[in-house]
Amino acid sequence: MKVFKFGITEVVVHINEELNKQHRENLSEQVNNLKGISSVLMSDQKPHLMRVSYDPQTISSQQVLEGVKNTGIHAQLAGWL
């Protein structure tokens, strides 16, 4: 896990598409490579949900969502943790 100076915030992103495991892993890796992202979690039990931990001093929840959408996925913010 990456370490940031400021507090970490978490957001849940709802993925509209049906993604297989490999596609979810690729998506997680792409989002995790965005500046300010600390971790990305997706589970086989809830494949439509992506939990993203990020540094709000570096990236906003809207930028997280745009990072997901820029991969060609249709998604929306589902909530904050």
Image (cartoon, helix red, strand yellow):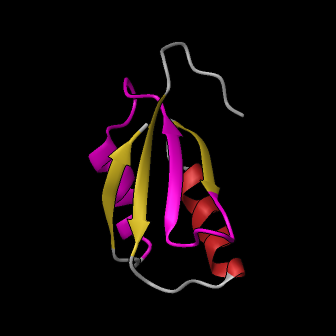
Report x, y in % for residue 12.
43, 51
Residue at 37% of width from left, 23% of height from top? 57
* Residue 41 in magenta stretch: no
Residue 74's place in the image compared with 36, above or below, is: below
Q: Is residue 62 magenta?
A: yes
Q: How many labels does the image show?
A: 0
Q: Residue at x 48, y 14 (%)?
A: 6
Compared across the picture, whether 18 is left or right of 80 comes to right
Query: Which residue is the extreme one toward the top?
Result: 5
Residue 25, relative to residue 55: is it above or below?
below
User: Which residue is depicted at the point 65% across and 23% down?
Assistant: 3
Residue 20, x across and y down, in percent: 65, 85
The quadrant of the picture occupied by the C terminus is top left
Residue stretch rendered in magenta on the structure:
42-71
- Residue drawn at x 58%, y 50% is 33
Camera-nearest residue between 48 and 1: 48
Q: Which residue in the rendered view is the most extreme toward the front?
A: 45
